[in-house]
C-alpha cells in the first residue's frame, strides 16, 4: 500500500511525495477541490428524500465545500474525512462561517483504513479523489459496507470513451467502468457529464494561474526546491489539458442491485 502522502499527492495530480507538506500553501486560494457541489446536491435531491438527518459520508473531503453546501441545502448530517489536517481545519472554519457546524463533522484520517469502521450511511461521496482505493471494483468493494442497502454512492471522476484511441495508465473505458460496477454487485443509475465550455476553460485558466503563483512564491522561499515546484506546475498544466481534451468527467450515482 502506498503511504498516505503518496496517495494524497497522486490524488492532487503530483508525482513527488515531498510536495505533500506544501499542498495547503499551494491550494490556499481554493475552497472547492475536485467535484462541483451543486451537481452533487442535485443528485442527492434526485435520488434520496434529502431529509434532515440523512447520513452522508464525504471521503477525501478536502476543505469541506461539498459537505457544507449539501448540509445547507438539505439539513443532512455530514462526516467529512481527509488526510490533510490543514484542509480539515479549513473545513471546520467554513462550516462555522456557514452556520452548519451542528450538521458537519470533520476529521483527519486515512480513508483507506478508516472506512472499515464506518457504517450506516445513506450517501457516500468520492469527489475526484483518483484511485486512492484502486480501480472502480476495488473502490466499491472497499466502501460499500459503510452504505445502507438503500443508499447511494456518488463518484465524480473521469473515464475514456470506448471509441477513443487515447490511453492513460489509470484511465478506464466506459464499458470497463460499467463492468466493474456490476462485478461489485451494484449498478449505475444516473450520471451527470461535466461539459467543457468557454466558461469552464476560463475557470481552469484562473485556477492554474492561482496555483502557479503560489508555487513561484514557494520557489522564492525554498530556492533549493525550485525543481519540485516547477514539476508540480507542469503536472497541473498537463492535467488541465487532459481534462479539457481527453477525459470524460462525470458524477455517477451507484446503488446496490
Image (cartoon, rainbow, N blue to C red):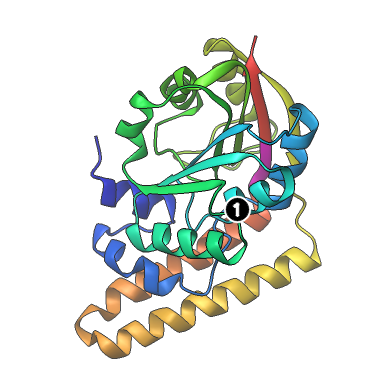
Residue 51 or residue 115, whichever sits in front: 51
Residue 132 or residue 72, whichever sits in front: 72
The structure residue drawn at horizontal position 67% and vertical position 55%, both measured from the top left corner, is 245
Q: Is residue 95 above or below residue 233?
A: above
Residue 122 or residue 162, whichever sits in front: 122
Q: Which residue is mark 1?
A: 68
The structure residue drawn at horizontal position 56% and vertical position 73%, both measured from the top left corner, is 208
Residue 60 at x, y = what percent? 45, 46
Q: Is residue 35 above or below residue 230?
A: above
Q: Residues within 10 Å of mark 1 (few under 14, many from 20)?
A: many
Region rendered in magenta:
247-251
Q: Is residue 158 above or below residue 33?
A: above
Task: Kindly state the secondary structure of the residue where label 1 is placed.
Answer: helix
Name the quadrant containing residue 81: top left
Q: Quadrant of the C terminus?
A: top right
Residue 141 at x, y = what percent? 44, 19
Prevailing SS of the magenta stretch: strand
Amino acid at each position: 500500500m502506498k503511504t498516505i502522502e503518496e496517495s494524497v499527492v497522486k490524488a492532487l495530480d503530483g508525482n513527488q511525495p515531498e510536495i505533500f507538506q506544501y499542498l495547503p500553501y499551494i491550494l490556499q486560494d481554493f475552497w472547492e477541490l475536485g467535484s462541483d457541489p451543486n451537481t452533487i446536491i442535485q443528485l442527492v435531491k434526485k435520488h434520496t428524500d434529502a431529509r434532515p438527518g440523512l447520513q452522508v459520508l464525504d471521503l477525501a473531503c478536502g476543505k469541506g465545500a461539498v459537505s457544507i453546501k449539501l448540509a445547507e441545502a438539505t439539513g443532512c448530517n455530514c462526516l467529512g474525512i481527509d488526510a490533510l489536517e490543514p484542509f480539515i481545519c479549513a473545513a471546520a472554519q467554513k462550516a462555522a462561517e456557514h452556520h452548519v457546524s451542528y450538521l458537519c463533522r470533520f476529521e483527519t484520517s486515512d480513508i483507506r483504513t478508516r472506512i472499515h469502521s464506518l457504517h450506516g450511511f445513506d450517501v457516500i461521496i468520492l469527489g475526484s479523489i483518483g484511485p486512492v482505493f484502486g480501480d472502480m471494483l476495488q473502490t466499491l468493494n472497499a466502501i460499500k459496507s459503510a452504505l445502507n442497502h438503500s443508499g447511494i454512492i456518488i463518484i465524480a471522476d473521469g473515464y475514456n470513451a470506448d471509441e477513443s484511441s487515447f490511453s492513460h495508465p489509470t484511465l478506464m473505458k466506459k464499458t470497463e467502468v460499467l463492468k466493474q460496477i456490476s462485478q461489485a454487485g451494484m449498478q449505475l443509475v444516473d450520471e451527470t457529464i461535466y461539459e467543457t465550455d468557454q466558461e469552464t476553460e476560463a475557470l481552469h485558466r484562473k485556477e492554474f494561474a492561482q496555483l502557479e503563483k503560489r508555487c513561484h512564491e514557494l520557489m522564492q522561499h525554498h530556492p533549493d526546491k525550485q525543481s519540485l515546484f516547477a514539476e508540480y506546475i507542469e503536472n497541473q498544466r498537463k492535467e488541465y489539458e487532459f481534462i479539457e481534451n481527453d477525459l470524460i468527467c462525470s458524477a455517477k450515482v451507484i446503488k446496490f442491485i
